[in-house]
Image: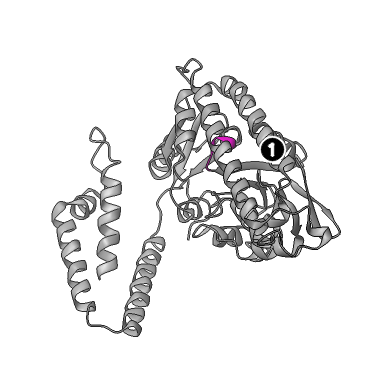
C-alpha cells in the first residue's frame, strides 16, 4: 500500500499543476483533487514513517524482502495504469504508431556525462597515471622518455585546470554578445564557432603534451567494459535496438579522444550495433603513440556529423530524429533534431540557451501541451529548429517518452 500511495500523491500533484482553471472541468477532477490534496500527502507521509518504524528491527535479509515487495507493488500499480483503455490517440509513447516499413527513427546521443557518470577524459587520464612508472629509478633505456606517475598526475591536473578556466572565459565571451529577443540559431552558430576553435586548441594541447602516449589498447577496452553508465541508459538502448518492430539507427557523437573506449563500453552491454562517431587514438602495434585523429572535436564538428548522417540516409522512409545531450557542445544538434532532449542541469548550457532565445521545457509539461495540440489539430508536429528543447533528469523519463513501459 505504501508505494501506491506515494505514486498516487506524486501523480495527483503533477497533473494538478498542469490543469488550466479556464478550461471545462476535467473528467478526472475528483481523482486529481483527492490525490493532490495536503490531507492525502500527510496520510502518505504517516504511512511511510510507520513502515520505517516497523522496519527498524528487521534483519538485512528481511529488509531485502521488503524492498523486493515494494518494487513489485510499484510495478503492478504501473501495469494497472498501462492496462486502462484510451479513448483518444496519444503523443506518447513517441513510437506508438511507428511502422517499420514506412518510418525510421534516428536517435543521436552524446556520450560523456549524458550516458556516463564520469567524463571519459578522466578515465583515460587515470589509465595513463596507473600505467606510468612510480619513479625514474630503475627505468630501462626504452622507458626513459616516460614520465613518472606523479609527474603525469600533476600535468593532467594542470591541463584540466587550464581547460576549465579557458572554457569559462570562452562562455563569458559568448554572453557578451547582444542578447537575442527571440530564437536566433544563426547567431548561436556563429558564437559556437568560437567555442569550436577553443575545443580544438584544447585537444591539440593534450596531444602535444604526450600525456596519452603508451596506453595499451587492452587496458583501454577493459576500462570501457567497467565504465559506469547513468541509471537506465543501457536498458533504454537495449530496449530500443532489440525491438524488431522498430526501424531504428543509433549514433553516438562524442568529443571523446578514444572511440575504442566508447565501443567497448557499449559492447559490454551487448550494444555493438550502436554507431560511434568520435576521435581515434593512433596506435603502434597495440600501444598509443599519443596522437589523436580529430574527427569530432567541437560543436561544429558534431553538427556536421549529424547533418552528414541524415544526408546519407535513404529517402524512402519518413524519418524522425531525436538528439540527447547535456552540454553547450550539443546545442546545435539538439536544436536541429525533431526532438531535442537535455539531460542534467549544465549551468553553462542554460546561460547560453537563454541568451539566444532557446526555450527549455520540462518533458512532462511539454508532452501535455503537445497532447492538447494533437487533440485540436490531429498532429503532434515534432519539428527541428523550433527553438524548444525538452529537459529530463533521468533516462527513465526518456524511456517512458520514446518507448513506454
Q: Is residue 109 visible?
A: no
The magenta region covers 326-330
The quarter of the picture where residue 312 lies is top right
- Picture coordinates of residue 129, whole percent (x, y): 64, 57
Q: How is the image coloured?
A: one colour
Camera-side residue: 398 or 76? 398
Above or below for 103 versus 187: below
Give the labeled residue for mark 1.
205
- Picture coordinates of residue 373, whole percent (x, y): 43, 35
- Picture coordinates of residue 206, whole percent (x, y): 69, 42
Q: How many marks?
A: 1
Camera-side residue: 177 or 158? 158
Above or below for 346 versus 354: below
The quarter of the picture where residue 268 lies is bottom right
Q: Name the residue at 49% across, 15% down.
A: 178
- Picture coordinates of residue 89, whole percent (x, y): 46, 47
Above or below for 110 versus 69: above
Amino acid at each position: 500500500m505504501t508505494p501506491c500511495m506515494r505514486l498516487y500523491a506524486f501523480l495527483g500533484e503533477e497533473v494538478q499543476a498542469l490543469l488550466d482553471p479556464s478550461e471545462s472541468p476535467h473528467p478526472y477532477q475528483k481523482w486529481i483533487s483527492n490525490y493532490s490534496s495536503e490531507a492525502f500527502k500527510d496520510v502518505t507521509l504517516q504511512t511511510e514513517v510507520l513502515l520505517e518504524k516497523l522496519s527498524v528491527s528487521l534483519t538485512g535479509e528481511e529488509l531485502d524482502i521488503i524492498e523486493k515487495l515494494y518494487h513489485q507493488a510499484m510495478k503492478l500499480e504501473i501495469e494497472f495504469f498501462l492496462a486502462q483503455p484510451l479513448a483518444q490517440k496519444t503523443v506518447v509513447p513517441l513510437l506508438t504508431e511507428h511502422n517499420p516499413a514506412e518510418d525510421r527513427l534516428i536517435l543521436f546521443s552524446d556520450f560523456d556525462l549524458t550516458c556516463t557518470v564520469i567524463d571519459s577524459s578522466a578515465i583515460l587520464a587515470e589509465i595513463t597515471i596507473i600505467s606510468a612508472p612510480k619513479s625514474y629509478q630503475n627505468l630501462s633505456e626504452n622507458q626513459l622518455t616516460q614520465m613518472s606517475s606523479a609527474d603525469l598526475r600533476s600535468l593532467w591536473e594542470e591541463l584540466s585546470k587550464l581547460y576549465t578556466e579557458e572554457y569559462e572565459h570562452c562562455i563569458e565571451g559568448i554572453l557578451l554578445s547582444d542578447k537575442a529577443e527571440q530564437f536566433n540559431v544563426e547567431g548561436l552558430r556563429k558564437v559556437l564557432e568560437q567555442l569550436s576553435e577553443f575545443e580544438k586548441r584544447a585537444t591539440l594541447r593534450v596531444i602535444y603534451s604526450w600525456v596519452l602516449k603508451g596506453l595499451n589498447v587492452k587496458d583501454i577496452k577493459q576500462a570501457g567494459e567497467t565504465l559506469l553508465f547513468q541509471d537506465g541508459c543501457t536498458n533504454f538502448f537495449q530496449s530500443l535496438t532489440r525491438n524488431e518492430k522498430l526501424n531504428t539507427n543509433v549514433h553516438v557523437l562524442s568529443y571523446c579522444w578514444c572511440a575504442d573506449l566508447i565501443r567497448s563500453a557499449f559492447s559490454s552491454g551487448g550494444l555493438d550495433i550502436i554507431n560511434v562517431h568520435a576521435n581515434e587514438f593512433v596506435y603502434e602495434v597495440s600501444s598509443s603513440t599519443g596522437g589523436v585523429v580529430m574527427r569530432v572535436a567541437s560543436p561544429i564538428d558534431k553538427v556536421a556529423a549529424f547533418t552528414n548522417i541524415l544526408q546519407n540516409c535513404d529517402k524512402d522512409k519518413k524519418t524522425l530524429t531525436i538528439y540527447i545531450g547535456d552540454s553547450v557542445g550539443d546545442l546545435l544538434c539538439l536544436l536541429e533534431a525533431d526532438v531535442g532532449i537535455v539531460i542534467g542541469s549544465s549551468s553553462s548550457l542554460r546561460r547560453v540557451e537563454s541568451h539566444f532565445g532557446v526555450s527549455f521545457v520540462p518533458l512532462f509539461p511539454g508532452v501535455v501541451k503537445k497532447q492538447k495540440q494533437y487533440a485540436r489539430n490531429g498532429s503532434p508536429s515534432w519539428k527541428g529548429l523550433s527553438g524548444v528543447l525538452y529537459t529530463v533528469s533521468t533516462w527513465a523519463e526518456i524511456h517512458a517518452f520514446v518507448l513506454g513501459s
